[in-house]
Image (cartoon, rainbow, N blue to C red):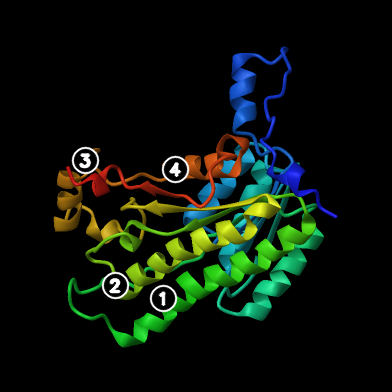
Amino acid sequence: MVDRKVLMAAPNFLGEDKSLTPDQKALKRFSVAGKNVVITGGAGGLGLDSAYALLEHGAEGVLLLDLNVKQLEETRRTVRELYPDRTIEVKQVDVTNYKQVLKSVEYASKVLKSIDIVLPFAGVSGGEGDGDAPDRVETWQQIMDINTTGVFYVTKSFGDYMVKQGKGGSIIMTASLAGHSFCVPCPIAYGASKSAVLSMRTNFAKLYGRAGIRVNSISPGFFKSPMTEELSGGILEKDFQRKSTTGRFGQRGEISGIVVLLASGAGSFISGADLVIDGGYSAKL
């Protein structure tokens, strides 16, 4: 039987080792050494960036799940070349298919020594919305299926396994600035799907908290990416620059550090939280 008092105890990740230098303590505070990670949407974008960041901080194994088989295989080759001593596996999965998600849990349990960190990052934007006008009906179901139902399937399936595993862990969802407030040019379905993720985060944090599993979410604002490339230099970017305290779009890599924080001992007392990463846009100064 799992000792809940042990799982819920404050971590002693720095210990009383007087031999550690300040630099070593800093590294150990954010270390995920020996941990194994599962990431959906892992073939590219934020999922892959997070995989690299966690590997840099000592992750022992990573399983990347995605729908794009070709991109998965290319990603596996690239990551294995950089980390030949780690376990790097990939598997095709449609997060909207519950049976496939359950099979991915079974696969993860076989190829990884444990499942410690889960990032349900698969998602779609659905293209541009039309401001205050209703979006196209045909895009609603796809966006909700992937961004909301898919996140639920992955979090519930892997979370239940982690409870049985009895080692605690961390689950980090991706919400969005669009889940907090009106967003142009985001489709209505996109904002709704991310608002649902914010609600799931608090409920799952409560559900799994006594098993030592922390559940949090991150809410990115606008970041430079292939998806936002067409918006660069336009009215939206100028508006974002004017309203945000940093005066710019986010850059690749400026989210993955937050993922490391939430996954590591440095974030051991953070659960049920949503961290907004929007360059100060939501401050509306």
Which label's residue is closer to the chain start, 3 or 4? 3
Which label's residue is closer to the chain start, 3 or 1? 1
Helix, strand or loop at mark 2? loop
Which label's residue is closer to the chain start, 2 or 1? 1
The image shows residue 94, relative to residue 44, as above or below, that is below
Q: Quadrant of the N terminus?
A: bottom right
Residue with the mark numbered 2: 187
Residue with the mark numbered 3: 247
Marks 3/4: CA distance?
17 Å
Picture coordinates of residue 111 (x, y %)? 79, 58
Q: Which residue occupies 74% across, 44% down?
A: 5
Q: Is residue 176 left or right of residue 264?
A: left
The image shows residue 10, relative to residue 243, as above or below, that is above
Which label's residue is closer to the chain start, 1 or 4? 1
Q: Which residue occupies 71% across, 12% down?
A: 18
Q: Which residue occupies 26% across, 49% down?
A: 282
Q: Which residue occupies 15% across, 45% down?
A: 242
Helix, strand or loop at mark 4? loop
Which label's residue is closer to the chain start, 4 or 2? 2
Marks 1/4: CA distance?
25 Å
Marks 2/3: CA distance?
24 Å
Residue with the mark numbered 4: 253
Q: Is residue 187 left or right of residue 172?
A: left
Q: Disc 3 or disc 4, which is closer to the eye?
A: 3
Picture coordinates of residue 213 (x, y %)? 65, 52
Given the image, on which type of amino acid does mark 4 rest?
A: Gly
